[in-house]
Amino acid sequence: MDFKKLLKYVFVAGLMGAIIAAPATEAIAAVSAEEKTDEERAEEARQKKVQAEVENMIKEATAPVNKTVAGVKSAVDGYYFAKKVQGVALTPSVPGTGSFVKVADTDATKSTAAVAVASNVASSFSGTVGPCINVYYGKMTGGKFTSSTEGTAGTISIGIPASFQTAGMDYSIVAVYAGGAYKIFNNISTNASVVTANVDQATSSNVMYAVVKSPAGTAPVPVADEASDNTANNKTDRTANNASDKDKKKSDSASASASTGASDEISEKASDSASTDSSSDTVSKTSNKTSNKTSDTASDSASTGASDKTSNKTSEKASDSASTESSR
C-alpha cells in the first residue's frame, strides 16, 4: 500500500469516528438532561436569573456615575445603589482604612423612625427633609462584609436632585444613627447642586443621611452633639433639668427654710449667726449654754446641708439618666 492510500484510510477512519462519537455524546447529554425533574430545571433557571441580576446590580452599583459628585469621585470602595440623588462621594479623614460601604436610597416607608427623627429636627429650624440615603459602613474581606465604624469620619458629598434645588435656600445634612441619635452638619459646598459636610465619627455603622433645605440664614450652627442616646450627653436636657432642680430648691427654701431641704447658703448663715452669738454672750453662763445649743443646731444644719448637697447631686444625676432614657 502506497503512502497516498494510507492517508486516505486514516482520513476516512477519522470521519467515521467523528460521526459515530457525536451521536453517542448527544445521547449521553440527552439522558443526563432527562434525569432532571421539572422542579430541578425550574430551580436551575431561577438561580441563573438571580445570578444574572446580582451581577447586573453589582455592575451598576460600582459604576462611576453613582459614586461621583460634581466630578469628584468617592475615595471609598463599595456598592453605591442610590438613585434618588445625583451621586454620593465619601472621603475618609484617615485614608487607607480599607473601608467599604453600601449606599442605598431610603424613605419614610423603609426607614420610618429615622426619617421621623430627621423631620422633627428639620422642623425646628423651618427645614424640609428631601432625599435620604442609608450608608452601611464596614469592611469587605474575602467577599464577606463586616460592619465597622472605622473610617466613618470624613467628608460626605451628596448631589442634590434638580427637583429639590431652590435658589437662595440653605442646605444641611441631618445624620441619624442607630437608637435615634442625630447630628446636624452644615453645608460647606459652594456648588448649588451639591451639599457637602464634614461628618464626625459615627456612633453606629448604619447611618441615615437626610438632605435638608431651609430659608436662608436658618440653618443652625452645629454644637457639640445633638445625640439623644447614651453615647453622648444631651446638653439641652441636662441644662433644663438642672434649672428645674434649682427652682425646686428655691421653692423648698422659701416655704420651709428649717426643713431638710435647706440650702448650703442658709447653713452658712446659721453658722455665722451662731459664731456671733457665741462672741457677744460670753459674760453670761446662761448665754453660753444658749450659744452652745445654737452652735450645735448650726452644726447640725450645716451637716444636713452637706447631706442635701450630696442628695441634690445624686438627684441631678438621676434626672440626667432619666432624661437620657426618655430620649431613647
Image: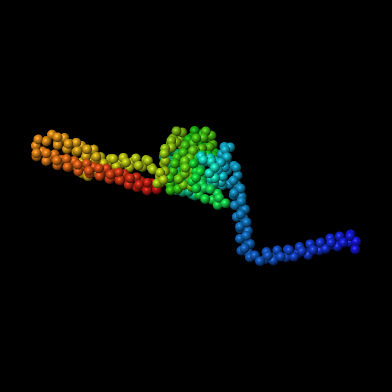
Is residue 80 visible from the viewing direction of this image?
Answer: no
Residue 252 sits in which quadrant? top left
Question: Could you say which is closer to the camera, residue 40 or residue 130?
Answer: 40
Question: Could you say which is closer to the camera, residue 128 or residue 16?
Answer: 16
The mark tally for this picture is 0
Q: Residue at x 44, y 41 (%)?
A: 183
Question: Could you say which is closer to the camera, residue 33 or residue 224?
Answer: 224
Q: Residue at x 43, y 46 (%)?
A: 180
Q: Position of residue 179 (x, y in %)?
A: 43, 48
Q: Position of residue 325 (x, y in %)?
A: 37, 48
Q: Residue at x 35, y 42 (%)?
A: 238
Q: Position of residue 123 (x, y in %)?
A: 43, 40
Q: Residue at x 43, y 37 (%)?
A: 222
Is residue 198 visible from the viewing direction of this image?
Answer: yes
Q: Tell me if residue 274 comes above or below residue 58 in the rendering.
A: above
Quadrant where the N terminus lies?
A: bottom right
Q: Position of residue 42 (x, y in %)?
A: 62, 61
**Picture colour scheme:** rainbow
Q: Tell me if residue 1 comes above or below residue 156 in the rendering.
A: below
Q: Residue furthest right?
A: 2
- The reply, left or right, for residue 220 in relation to residue 63 is left
